[in-house]
Image (cartoon, rainbow, N blue to C red):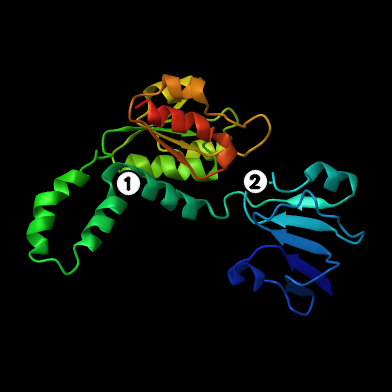
Amino acid sequence: MYNIQTLNKISAVGTDIFDKSKYNVSDAHENPDAIMVRSAKMHDMQFNENLLAIARAGAGVNNIPVERCAEEGICVFNTPGANSNAVKELAICALLLASRKITEAAVWAASLKGTPDAPKTVEGGKSKFAGPEIMGKTLGIIGLGAIGGKIANTAVALGMKVIGYDPYLSVNNAVLLDSSVKVVTDINDIYKNSDYISIHMPYTPQTKNTIDSEQIAMMKDGVRLINLARGELINSEAVINAISAG
């Protein structure tokens, strides 16, 4: 019997696959043979001698001490693409939320509950929540892997122009891209030409602050940034300063 410890809540869709006569999956094991993790930080964890493997339920492994695991003979796996459709849908949702002031409008509409003649008030006030349509706009995608590629194709179907940058684009991912997606070799083309930018890349010391004040300075006024990967990929202070500057 192998004991598998879960450090985060893992969907039963995955854990139910394990043969219960061979594997015991729980968050309570103190000396597990394997660990399943999502976002829990493991760099300060001490591993028992019988630990064989760590499986990351996601793509990034920056929360796992990979080099130390290699020294201790612990295999580290990730699962790129496993949640790619879910993230794609969230990114498309973010595109719309960033454009149409949907959340603000919903809060305002809810505030009218119980007021007289609310329909007339809505009709007269809804213009305050107007925003640009995404159709015809340019979406720049940094990273055209399992997630970025799906977003690119969906954005094309929604009538957007899509440009993408990925120096590590695989043949398999390239052939899945819609033929109208323009792949550029200079990342600055993304910054200079996009109305929306969505970033989909792993976080490493080299990719920290991929988007900083220098990159923001190249961008169009009113550009929308979407980051559903890792917070450290974009310098939040630089974004705040750019918003403050208009």
Residue 174: % across, % down: 51, 35
Look at label 1 and name its amino acid: Leu
- The correct choice, above or below, for 220 with respect to 62 in the image is above
Placement of the N terminus among the 4 image quadrants: bottom right
Quadrant in which residue 163 is drawn: top left
Compared across the picture, whether 220 is left or right of 105 comes to: right
Please give the residue where the numbered disc 2 appears in the rendered image: 60
Compared across the picture, whether 99 is left or right of 16 comes to: left
Which residue reaches farthest bottom? 21
Please give the residue where the numbered disc 1 appears in the rendered image: 96
Which residue reaches farthest front? 115
Q: Residue at left 64%, top 46%?
A: 60
177 and 213: which is toward the camera: 213
Residue 164 appears in the picture as rendered: no
Q: Secondary structure at mark 2?
A: loop
Residue 153 appears in the picture as rendered: yes
Residue 147: % across, % down: 51, 45
Q: Residue at left 67%, top 35%?
A: 204
Compared across the picture, whether 162 is left or right of 70 comes to: left
Q: Residue at left 60%, top 72%?
A: 12
